[in-house]
Amino acid sequence: MGIRIGIGEDTHRTELGGPLRLGGVDIPHDRRLVGHSDSDVLLHALTDAVLGAAALGDIGAMFPNTSEENRGRDSAEMLALAYREVVAAGYCLANLDCVVSAERPKLLPHAETIRQRVATILDVEVEQIGLKAKTGEGVGPVGREEVIDARCVGLLVKSDG
Ligand code: MG
């Protein structure tokens, strides 16, 4: 079977202070994400989607948060390395579709920049990257701006040698 689907999800807490690193882009904002790496919740979900589609495990196994070398690490670099493994396993990306849930900031003005950045990291066309933004409607951890969530599905196809 030459078609493989994968799913990725991630959540990161927020704290005061910007900018907000999302999809490999620094967005001007008064809150940022907290975590061991650069905490780019979108790129983490996306990395898990492509790794999962190729049954290559997950980002936590490939880049342990117990490792000093991953402290503050650029998630774009982790995604590029993970996708390199996917390509080595004989697959290439058909498309990704992502949903980011954040009460603030409004992501629509940054959507094209993020899509282009993700496409550049993966060396694919921007048309292969879908991105949608939701809010938490003012309720729950997303609505209270305590966290930002991301979900992503990715489709891989077997490359022809
Ligand atoms: Mg994460």
Image (cartoon, rainbow, N blue to C red):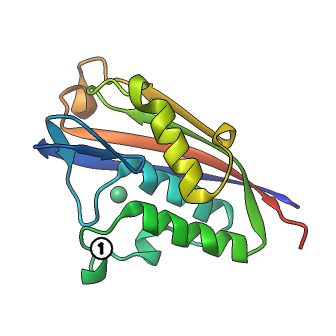
Q: Can see residue 73?
A: yes
Residue 102's image quarter?
top left
The amino acid at mark 1 is: Asn
Quarter of image, res 56:
bottom right
Q: Position of residue 73 (x, y in %)?
A: 31, 69
Q: Quadrant of the N terminus?
A: bottom right
Whether residue 67 appears in this view of the structure is no
Question: Height in image: 56 above or below 142?
Answer: below
> Is residue 156 found left or right of 144 in the rendered image?
right
Q: How many marks?
A: 1
In-image side of 126 versus 135 (left or right): right
Which is more toward the observer, 90 or 26?
A: 26
The residue that disc 1 covers is 65
User: In the image, what residue occupies the spot 64% across and 57% down?
Assistant: 123
Residue 64 location in percent, x, y?
Answer: 35, 77
Query: Residue 119 versus residue 48: which sits nearer the camera?
Result: 119
Q: x, y percentage for residue 94?
A: 75, 49
Would residue 74 appear left or right of 30 to someone viewing this image?
right
Indicate left or right for 56 with 74 as reference. Answer: right
Give the percent coordinates (x, y) of residue 122: 60, 58
- Secondary structure state at the residue bearing disc 1: loop
Is residue 96 or residue 143 the one in the foreground? 96
Instruction: Look at the image and tell me in which quarter the C terminus lies.
Output: bottom right
**Residue drawn at 25 percent across, 67 percent down:** 72
The residue at the point 36 percent across, 50 percent down is 41
Q: Is mark 1 within 8 Å of ligand 1?
A: no
